[in-house]
Image: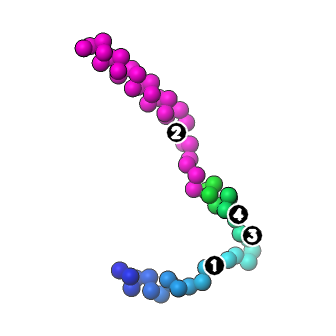
Amino acid sequence: MKEDYDDIINLPHHVSKNRPQMSMYQRAAQFAPFAALTGHDKAIEQTTKDNVESYENNS
């Protein structure tokens, strides 16, 4: 599989002439966790509490 990338592995790193280089902070922000599931943790906690209560009441 190594030979699959032999043609590109030693190419120089591209630096844009038209756009400024991003700071480390800006680059890191792109990969930060995305909070698409806002409130998901609370919903899981509530479901856990409900299940524990149900289990205790039925035991």
Mark 2 or mark 4: which comes first in sequence? 4
Give yes or no for residue 1 being in the magenta stretch.
no
Q: On screen, 58 above or below 24?
A: above
| Residue drawn at the location 52% of the way across and 39% of the way down | 37
State which mark lies toward you, 4 or 3.
4
Asked if labels 1 and 3 touch by Cβ distance under 8 angstroms, the answer is: no
Q: Mark 4 points at which residue?
A: 23
In 3D space, how far apart are the residues under numbered discs 1 and 4 (Cα atoms)?
Answer: 16 Å
Give yes or no for residue 56 being in the magenta stretch.
yes
| Residue in the foreground of this view, choosing between 43 and 57 | 57
In 3D space, how far apart are the residues under numbered discs 3 and 1 (Cα atoms)?
Answer: 12 Å
Mark 4: secondary structure: loop
Q: Name the residue under label 1.
A: 14
Q: In this view, does 33 lie to the left or right of 25?
A: left
On residue 37, the disc is: 2
Prevailing secondary structure class for the magenta stretch in the rendered image: helix
Q: What residue type is labelled 1?
A: His
| Magenta-colored span | 31-59
Q: What residue type is labelled 4?
A: Ser
State which mark lies toward you, 2 or 4.
4
